[in-house]
Image (spheres, helix red, strand yellow):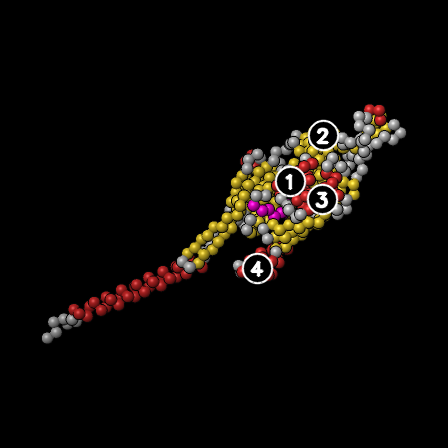
Amino acid sequence: MNEYPQYGPPSALPKKKSAKIFWILGAILVIIIIVAWLSIATLKFDEPEQIEISENNLLGISNSLSLVENQTVVFNLKGREYTFEVYSIEEDLVMIYFKNSSKHGIVGFPIVAGMTQRFDIDKDGDLDIITSLVDVETKTKSFLFKKIEQKIARITLQGIADPECVEETTCSPNWATCEQELQSRLCWKSMKCGGISEKIAGSNFYVARACDMEDDPESTPNLVLECGGDIDCFIGAIEGCNLANLTYDFTFNLYGWEQDHNYYYELQGPVSGNCSLYMRIEDVSGGYDAVTTQTFLDSGMTQSQIDQQEQGINDALQTTVGKDGTCLYSEDKLTQIFSDLKVGTYSSENYGDCTGEIFGS
């Protein structure tokens, strides 16, 4: 007689329980795999947030910002809203743009680590913004076998309060030789704002005095020395800050970016104990050198993408053509700058007491 008519022998019960546990564990494993796959597929950095800076916090305060590509900073200046945007980030090279409320680009320029730029974003003749690139760092996020990277530009942004300006007159220390018992010398007017003097265009004039007032009978006339493309001629004119001009081509390599320049330079005479140097960009363009191009190709970029990036930078550089500015230097500093330029050495630190469109004003 069967002692277990309803359930059968006890040995049969664990088999049904084991099968049920197997299916439950299998389902859990499938769910874990799906969740892991979704996590890997959607691994990304959060969308960058727009940063807002009030005018009070902008003026006179250096705002330290960590920004990623396409991230924007909105600020108000002189009653108008502006946007500062990081367009692209490479190794120690960042392309930045300033835009007004109508979204049209005002100023676009590449900056490198350690470089400081000053901009006149409202085109009123006064410097408005100082920005510098501290460095570029890389942030990494990973999950299982997938890893992504994001470049972060550490940038400072500061507004410049409107300076008080005064007009001043400066004259060359050299008097021309006597003619008809008179001699003359060149003078010009400058506008000094916030400690920076800028020669007023078209303000040259001559003053005359009687020859018997002359202390040095060996004085020479103020003649403009046309040096053409002869940089040695121009360097020779720096001693005594004689009037001279130069049109010069030079190239420098900036972290793998080879940039060609054609500049016009002009010595405009002494100003406040220094020598006034006027400069104007005649042409500028560039491209990545062979090593940098190969590095981009090895990283997975296509030649088309590299060409597109080069075109973007050159389009920004072309917006600077025709811009000019004036700097004040000692004669020794000017001689050093152009002697270095002659042998192909360039440094952004060469620009000190400068103003004008070429410097963003």
Mark nearer the N terminus (4 vs 3): 3
In the rendered image, the quadrant that contains the C terminus is top right
**Amino acid identity at mark 2:** Glu
Which residue reaches farthest left?
1
Q: Position of residue 218 (x, y in %)?
A: 81, 31
Q: Which of the two residues, 319 or 338, is positioned nearer the viewer here?
A: 338
Left or right of 133 on screen, residue 237? right
Question: In the image, which residues are magenta?
Answer: 107-113
> How far is the residue under mark 4 from the one under mark 3?
34 Å
Q: Which residue is mark 3?
A: 280
| Relative image position of residue 19 (x, y in whole percent) | 26, 68
- Residue 18's tag is none
Which secondary structure dominates the residues rendered in magenta? strand
The amino acid type, in three-letter code, at marker 4 is: Gln
Task: Specify the amino acid type for callout 3.
Answer: Arg
In what element is the residue under mark 4? helix
State which tag comes first along the sequence, 2 or 3. Answer: 2
Residue drawn at the location 70% of the way across and 31% of the way down = 273
- Residue wearing tag 1: 351
